[in-house]
Image (cartoon, grey):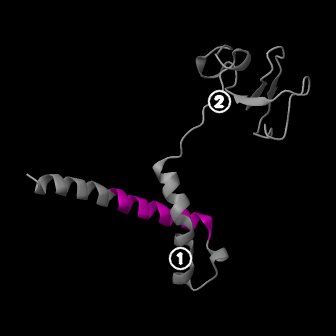
Amino acid sequence: FAWACTATNCNVIIQRHSRSVDPTKHCCGRCQGKLIEIEVPGRNGDGAGGNGANGYTPKKERKASEFALFVKSQSTNVRRSLARERKCDTKQVSQADVMKECGRLWQIRKMTEGTSSSSSSSSSS
């Protein structure tokens, strides 16, 4: 993980093994400028150059996948239903069990989407 200072005359790059730098709380130690997360120079065959601040490539924000959004919206309901089935508290249902059930529900959802779209196209002809 790497962060670069956004000041034009400052070439500071901060590298860490973990994402421990929070740009909203931390600043450049040399000039107190803002930090932006960048791609680590030399990774992905991009060399050390780029077109962001000071020639570095800014880190791209990735969109959450459909599955991630599905898990986010359904995990609370799944945890409650598993707790009801097992007659226990929701805190006693493990995250692994919740994820397994979310995966099973996702597979069912994908299969029903696939069959409904193919059956609707065949019934219209």
Report the amino acid beneath label 1: Leu
Asked if the stretch drawn in magenta spans residue 105, the answer is yes
Residue drawn at (86%, 28%), measured in percent from left and top? 28
Q: Residue 59's x, y, as percent?
A: 65, 30
The part of the image, by quadrant, that contains residue 94 is bottom right
Residue drawn at (52%, 62%), measured in percent from left and top? 73
Element under label 2? loop
The furthest residue to the left: 125
Q: Nearer the viewer, residue 86 or 70?
A: 70
Report the amino acid beneath label 2: Lys
Which residue is under mark 1?
A: 82
- Callout 1 crowding tier (Cα within 10 Å): few <14, some 14–19, many ≥20: many
Spatial CA distance of label 2 from label 1 is 39 Å
User: Is residue 61 shown above or below 94?
Assistant: above
The quarter in which the N terminus is drawn is top right
User: Is residue 51 shown above or below 77?
Assistant: above
Q: Nearer the viewer, residue 64 or 7?
A: 7
Which residue is under mark 2?
A: 59
- Which mark lies nearer to you, 2 or 1? 2
Magenta region: 94-110
Q: How many marks?
A: 2
User: Is residue 80 shown above or below 8?
Assistant: below
Secondary structure, magenta segment, majority class = helix
- Callout 2 crowding tier (Cα within 10 Å): few <14, some 14–19, many ≥20: some
Element under label 1? helix
Residue drawn at (69%, 19%), measured in percent from left and top? 56
Mark 2 vs 1, N-terminal side: 2
